[in-house]
Image (cartoon, rainbow, N blue to C red):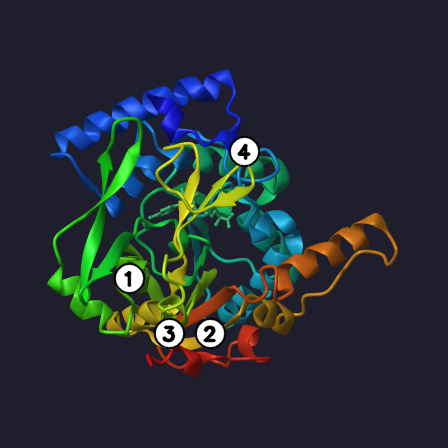
Amino acid sequence: MPQAATPAWAALDAAQEATLVRHVRILRTRIAQAGGVLSFAEFMEDVLYGAQIGYYTHETVFGAGGDFVTAPALSALFGQCLARQCAQILQHAPGPIIEAGAGGGRLAVDILGTLEALGALPTQYVLLERSARHRQEAQALIAREIPQLAGRVIITDTWPGASASVILANELLDALPAVRFRIREGQAHPLLVCAEKDAFGWREGAADARLTETLGTRGWPEGYTSEISWTGRRWVGEAAAHLGAGGLLLIIDYGFPAHEFYHPQRHDGTLMCHFRHHAHGDPLVLPGLQDITVHVDFTAIAEAGHTAGLVLAGYTSQAAFLLSLGLAPRAQPESRAHRDEVNAIKRLTLPHEMGELFKVMAFTHGETVPLAGFHLLDRRPALDRR
Ligand SMILES: C[S@@+](CC[C@H](N)C(=O)[O-])C[C@H]1O[C@@H](n2cnc3c(N)ncnc32)[C@H](O)[C@@H]1O
């Protein structure tokens, strides 16, 4: 039975095969209990975060031994730039930083270390992280690398009571469960996940009027398939409720404005899966063993921020943001460390690497000083719906 959920390229070892057999069995039971289908968002929730089979619950995710690499793992230079943006805000609005979806704590360590050196530490640094496994990894990393700051750090899976001066989210929104849909005769139909003889498959649900209305008519061809993230919009509302006066909400992720996200040529959406650094587009294989992500529609996120009473204070590429904040090698020229930094800077900024696909979006609660990270380039007009 599990073989069909195992693509040939995955080359699983015996333990992974056994895990997969168990996951497939649990998922099939879950689908049967739900009446034969799960919405794609329910499926994504189960295979990423479920207590029994969730990828983020059980797997080694980050770095060379995991499935993918995020910017904080590439170089401490990334966190150092973010720290300089935080310091600008903390100067006017001292208070806590909340990092949502903090993973294993690498970014927290780099930001706190830099803020300490700048004499600009926040009152608290809260790592808001859903995965217990990642919370434990973060705790160990902080104890190892910045023990002198551990007293300021809170690691939790619930939003803290205090309002934040800065809320950060790096690669969080792409990991939130999304709705997948297909267009038939001008109507959006949600795509559902069902169990098939040897695998999992897609089924089209009934036309969804709310979905069709939200998406609008965009001249999409018959069968056009894409995603929409209600959870991402809701998350912006939650973040807004926890942002203090003078505070900054900073979202970094891969994605586009709506007119690019829903371009007719992007006819199969933006779903991306990662297993052992192999990227592909089939979320139904390797349930619970691989990452599943959806790109971010930044126009929708800007609108969600507006609805939540926030002011859109900046939108730019990751390259422009980091260069605005002084991204440059720090190590001794011609040293090994210097070469590593130069390579990391290329990965963080070149257009065919992370520089252009990754965007940075900033919200405030009202007028603030011009944000340092957007002084080279601010692309807010590109977000307009067309
Ligand atoms: C793709 S990882 C990014 C981790 C880290 N920010 C980085 O850049 O390396 C997404 C992380 O968000 C966490 N996560 C997902 N949904 C969350 C939520 N609603 N609140 C807090 N953390 C969440 C996941 O457990 C995972 O650790």
Marks 3 and 1, how far apart at CA: 17 Å
Three-letter amino acid code at disc 2?
Tyr
Residue 140, disc = 4
> Residue 211: x and y, percent?
18, 62
* Rendered residue at 29%/67% (across/down): 221
Q: Quadrant of residue 287?
A: top left
Which of the marked residues, 1 or 2, is nearer the chain's N terminus? 1
Which of the marked residues, 2 or 4, is nearer the chain's N terminus? 4
For numbered disc 4, what is the local secondary structure?
helix
Tell me the residue that label 1 is attached to: 233
Which of the marked residues, 3 or 4, is nearer the chain's N terminus? 4
> Residue 262: x and y, percent?
35, 68
Is 114 on the left-hand or right-hand side of 62?
right
Tell me the residue that label 2 is attached to: 315
Q: Is residue 204 above or below residue 351?
A: above
Tell me the residue that label 3 is attached to: 259
Which of the marked residues, 3 or 1, is nearer the chain's N terminus? 1
